[in-house]
Image: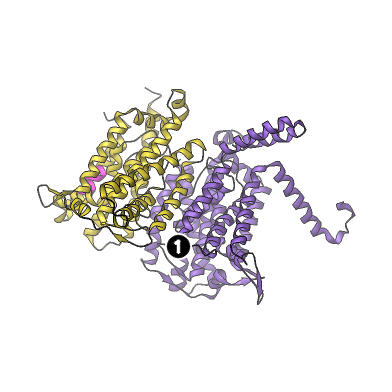
Chain colours: A yellow, B purple
C-alpha cells in the first residue's frame, strides 16, 4: 500500500512518464536519448534553483529573489572574469560566497525582524536585479578558455545524446540536496519547522539559526544556478532569468511539496522542473502550437496537482479517525 | 471655539474637525504615523535634491508638475492596491492581478478593434473579465480551501497565456476618443484617471468603514474560526474580497491600456502585484491578516511612486533606480518591524520611568503595538 504522503510524488512521476511516453509515441525524434539529455542540460539551472527553493518552501517560507540572484551572479561572474581578469574558479567561488551571504542576510532579516519572507525576498528581488544593473547594463560574452573547456565536456550515452558539464553538475547538486534533506539534522529541522513551528521550537529546534541557514542554502543554490546559467549561455545579461522564481515555485508545487510546509521531496521538484521542460519540448515538436500554450498547460498542471493534494489530505483525514 | 464660528463656514468647520480627529488618531496610534513621515521625508529630500520638484503649474486649466505626475502614474497601482488590501485583510494574497490587468487590457483592445460596440459595453466586458478572474480565485480559496498564494499563482502563470490568446500574441493598438480620455485627459484640472481612482478609494473606504463589511473582513482575517462562531459567513466574504480585487485589477488594466492605446499581453501590469503588496505592507498591514489600513495603503502607493519618479527626476543614472528603491523600502520595513518597535518602546519606557508624569502615555502606546500584532 502506498503511503498517502508519497502519493503526490507518484502522481508527478506518472504525469512525467505519460507526457514523455506521449512524446515518444507521437514523434520519432522524441525516442532518442538526445531529447532526455537535452532536457537535463536545458533545465539544469531551473532544477538547481528548484532544489534550493524546496528547502525554503518545506520550511513554510518562500524565496522570490532567486531569478534576480541568477542574473546578478552571472553579471558579477562576467565582471570578475572579463574586467578584473580573475581566474574563473576563483570568480565562481567569490560569486557563490556573495550569493550565500545575501541569502543569509535575508534569512537574518526574516528571523530577527520577523518580517514575512514574501516581503523580504521581494525586496531582495529588486535589490539583486538593481545590483546587476549597477555592474553592467548590457549582455556580456564570457570568453575564457576555462569556461569554454567546461562547456566542451561531453560524456556520450547510447543513442545520440550526451551529458554536458552543467547537466552532470546539476545531477550532483540534486543528489547533495536530497542527502541534505534526508540525512542531516538540518534537513530534519527544516521539515520540523515547516510541519509545526511552535512544536519544533518546543522540541528544541533552533528556529532562528535554521531559518538563516535555509535562506543561505537557497542563496547558494540560486547562485550555483546563476553560474550554471552563465556557462550554459556563455554570457551574462542583467535581464536574464526574469520570472524564474515562478517557474521554480511551480516546479516545487508540481513536485508534490505542500506550500504550507513540512511535506515534500527534493526529488519531486526535479520531476516538476522536468515536466515543465517536457511540455516545452512537446510544444516545440508540435510546431503549430503557440508559446502561450506552455503557460496555460503549466497553469492547468498546477491546478491539477493542488487539487490532487487537497483530495489526498481530505482522504487521509477522513481515514485517520476510523483507524 | 468651534461654536462661535458662523454657520456659513460649515464645510470649513467639518474640515477642521476632521483634521483634529486625524491628529487625535495619530497621537493614539503612533504606528499610523510611520507611512506619513516616510512620505514627507522622501518628498522633502527629493525637493532638496531636485529644485522645482514641488512646483505645480496651472496651464490651460490643467495642473502640471512632478506631484501631479506622481498621482497620474500612481493610479493603476493605487487601484490594484485597494483590492489587494481587502484581500490581505482576509489573510489572503492575490498574485494574479498583473495577469488580470493583461486580460482586461486585451479584452478592451480586441473589442474596440474588432467590434463597433459602444465604449461602455467594451468597458463593462473588460470589467466583467476581471470579475470572472476574481470569482475563479475566490472559488479556489474559499470553496476548495487552497492556500491563496498557490491559488492565485495558477492564474498568475496561466493568465498571461489567456491574454496572449485573446490578442493572438500581437500587441493590439486601438483608437477610441473615450478610452483616450480615460487614459490621458483632464477634468477639473486633474487627470480623469485620478478622479476615477479617487472615486473608487472613497467608495471602498465608505463601504469598509461605515458598514460592518470591513469589520467582518478583518475578523475573518484575524481568526477564521472565531468569526464563524459569531456567525460571519466567512466563505462568502473571502469570495467577494477576491472578486473585488479582480474588479480593481480590471479597472486598472483598462486605464493602462487606454494610456498606451494598446494591449501588451506580456508586459501590461508586469510586477504590479508586487508594488501593490508592498504598498499594503508599508501601510502597516500584516500578511497574516487582520487590520488593514486603506487610506495608508494609498500613502504607501504614493511612497513607491514618489520614489520611482524622484529617482528618475533626480538625474541619478537609471541603473541606480532599483537599488535605491529596494534599500529605502527595506529601511522602511525594518523601522516598522515588530522587533524594532518593541526595542524602541522598551527604550522609551525606561526613559519614561525616570520621568513618571508621562508614563501613562507610553504604556498605552505599547498596548496598541501588542494589539496590532
**Is there any visible trace of residue A254 in the rendered image?**
no
The magenta-colored residue range is A14-20
Q: Is residue B357 left or right of residue B95?
A: right
Front residue of A118 and A218: A218
Tag 1 subunit:
B
Task: Establish if B79 lies above or below B108.
Answer: above
Task: Establish if B260 lies above or below A28.
Answer: below
The x, y position of residue A268, in whole percent, is 29, 39
Image quadrant in which you'd find residue B266: bottom left
Q: Is residue A165 magenta?
A: no
The x, y position of residue B233, in whole percent, is 57, 40
The x, y position of residue B78, in whole percent, is 57, 57
Outermost residue, right direction?
A: B4
Q: Is residue A17 left or right of residue B271?
A: left
Front residue of B320 and B58: B320
Residue bearing the label numbered 1: B268
Q: Residue at x 78, y 52 (%)?
A: B17
Outermost residue, bottom direction?
A: B60
Amino acid at each position: 500500500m502506498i503511503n498517502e504522503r508519497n502519493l503526490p510524488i507518484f502522481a508527478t512521476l506518472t504525469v512525467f512518464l505519460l507526457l514523455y511516453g506521449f512524446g515518444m509515441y507521437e514523434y520519432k525524434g522524441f525516442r532518442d536519448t538526445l531529447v532526455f539529455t537535452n532536457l537535463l542540460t536545458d533545465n539544469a539551472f531551473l532544477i538547481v534553483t528548484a532544489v534550493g527553493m524546496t528547502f525554503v518552501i518545506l520550511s513554510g517560507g518562500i524565496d522570490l529573489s532567486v531569478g534576480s540572484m541568477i542574473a546578478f551572479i552571472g553579471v558579477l561572474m562576467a565582471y570578475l572574469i572579463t574586467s578584473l581578469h580573475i581566474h574563473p574558479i576563483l570568480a565562481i567561488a567569490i560569486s557563490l560566497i556573495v550569493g550565500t551571504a545575501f541569502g543569509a542576510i535575508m534569512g537574518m532579516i526574516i528571523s530577527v525582524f520577523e518580517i514575512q519572507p514574501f516581503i523580504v525576498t521581494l525586496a531582495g528581488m529588486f535589490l539583486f536585479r538593481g545590483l546587476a544593473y549597477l555592474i553592467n547594463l548590457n549582455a556580456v560574452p564570457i570568453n575564457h578558455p576555462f569556461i569554454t573547456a567546461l562547456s566542451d565536456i561531453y560524456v556520450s550515452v547510447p543513442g545520440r545524446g550526451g551529458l554536458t558539464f552543467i547537466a552532470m553538475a546539476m545531477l550532483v547538486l540534486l543528489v547533495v540536496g536530497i542527502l541534505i534533506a534526508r540525512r542531516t539534522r538540518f534537513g530534519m529541522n527544516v521539515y520540523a519547522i515547516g510541519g509545526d513551528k511552535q512544536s519544533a521550537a518546543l522540541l528544541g529546534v533552533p528556529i532562528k539559526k535554521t531559518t538563516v541557514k535555509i535562506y543561505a542554502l537557497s542563496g547558494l543554490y540560486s547562485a550555483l544556478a546563476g553560474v550554471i546559467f552563465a556557462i550554459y549561455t556563455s554570457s551574462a545579461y542583467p535581464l536574464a532569468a526574469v520570472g524564474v522564481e515562478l517557474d521554480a515555485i511551480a516546479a516545487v508545487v508540481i513536485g508534490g511539496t505542500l506550500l504550507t510546509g513540512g511535506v515534500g521531496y527534493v526529488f519531486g521538484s526535479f520531476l516538476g522542473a522536468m515536466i515543465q521542460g517536457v511540455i516545452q519540448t512537446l510544444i516545440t515538436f508540435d510546431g503549430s502550437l503557440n508559446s502561450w500554450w506552455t503557460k496555460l498547460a503549466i497553469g492547468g498542471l498546477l491546478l491539477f496537482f493542488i487539487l490532487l493534494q487537497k483530495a489526498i489530505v481530505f482522504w487521509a483525514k477522513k481515514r485517520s479517525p476510523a483507524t | 471655539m468651534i461654536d462661535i464660528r458662523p454657520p456659513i463656514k460649515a464645510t470649513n468647520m467639518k474640515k477642521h474637525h476632521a483634521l483634529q480627529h486625524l491628529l487625535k488618531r495619530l497621537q493614539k496610534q503612533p504606528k499610523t504615523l510611520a507611512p506619513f513621515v516616510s512620505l514627507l521625508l522622501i518628498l522633502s529630500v527629493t525637493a532638496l535634491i531636485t529644485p522645482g520638484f514641488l512646483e505645480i503649474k496651472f496651464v490651460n486649466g490643467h495642473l502640471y508638475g512632478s506631484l501631479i505626475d506622481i498621482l497620474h502614474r500612481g493610479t493603476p497601482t493605487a487601484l490594484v492596491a485597494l483590492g489587494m488590501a481587502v484581500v490581505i485583510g482576509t489573510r489572503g494574497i492575490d498574485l494574479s492581478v498583473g495577469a488580470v490587468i493583461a486580460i482586461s487590457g486585451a479584452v478592451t483592445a480586441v473589442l474596440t478593434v474588432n467590434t463597433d460596440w459602444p465604449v461602455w459595453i467594451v468597458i463593462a466586458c473588460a470589467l466583467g473579465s476581471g470579475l470572472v478572474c476574481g470569482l475563479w480565485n475566490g472559488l479556489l480559496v474559499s470553496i476548495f480551501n487552497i492556500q491563496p498564494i498557490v491559488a492565485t499563482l495558477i492564474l498568475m502563470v496561466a493568465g498571461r497565456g489567456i491574454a496572449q490568446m485573446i490578442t493572438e500574441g500581437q500587441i493590439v493598438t486601438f483608437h477610441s476618443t473615450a478610452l483616450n480620455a480615460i487614459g490621458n485627459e483632464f477634468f477639473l484640472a486633474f487627470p480623469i484617471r485620478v478622479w476615477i481612482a479617487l472615486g473608487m478609494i472613497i467608495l471602498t473606504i465608505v463601504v469598509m468603514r461605515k458598514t460592518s463589511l470591513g469589520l467582518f473582513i478583518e475578523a475573518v482575517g484575524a481568526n477564521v474560526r472565531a468569526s464563524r462562531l459569531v456567525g460571519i459567513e466567512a466563505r462568502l466574504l473571502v469570495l467577494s474580497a477576491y472578486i473585488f480585487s479582480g474588479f480593481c485589477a480590471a479597472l486598472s488594466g483598462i486605464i493602462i491600456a487606454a494610456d498606451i492605446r494598446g494591449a501588451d499581453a506580456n508586459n501590461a501590469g508586469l510586477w504590479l502585484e508586487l508594488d501593490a503588496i508592498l504598498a499594503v505592507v508599508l501601510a502597516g498591514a500584516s500578511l497574516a491578516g487582520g487590520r488593514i489600513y486603506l487610506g495608508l495603503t494609498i500613502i504607501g502607493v504614493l511612497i513607491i511612486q514618489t520614489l520611482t519618479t524622484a529617482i528618475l527626476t533626480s538625474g541619478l543614472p537609471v541603473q541606480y533606480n532599483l537599488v535605491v528603491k529596494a534599500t529605502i523600502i527595506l529601511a522602511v520595513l525594518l523601522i516598522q518591524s515588530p522587533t524594532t518597535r518593541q526595542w524602541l518602546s522598551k527604550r522609551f519606557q525606561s526613559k519614561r520611568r525616570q520621568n513618571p508624569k508621562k508614563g501613562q502615555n507610553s504604556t498605552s502606546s505599547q498596548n496598541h503595538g501588542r494589539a496590532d500584532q
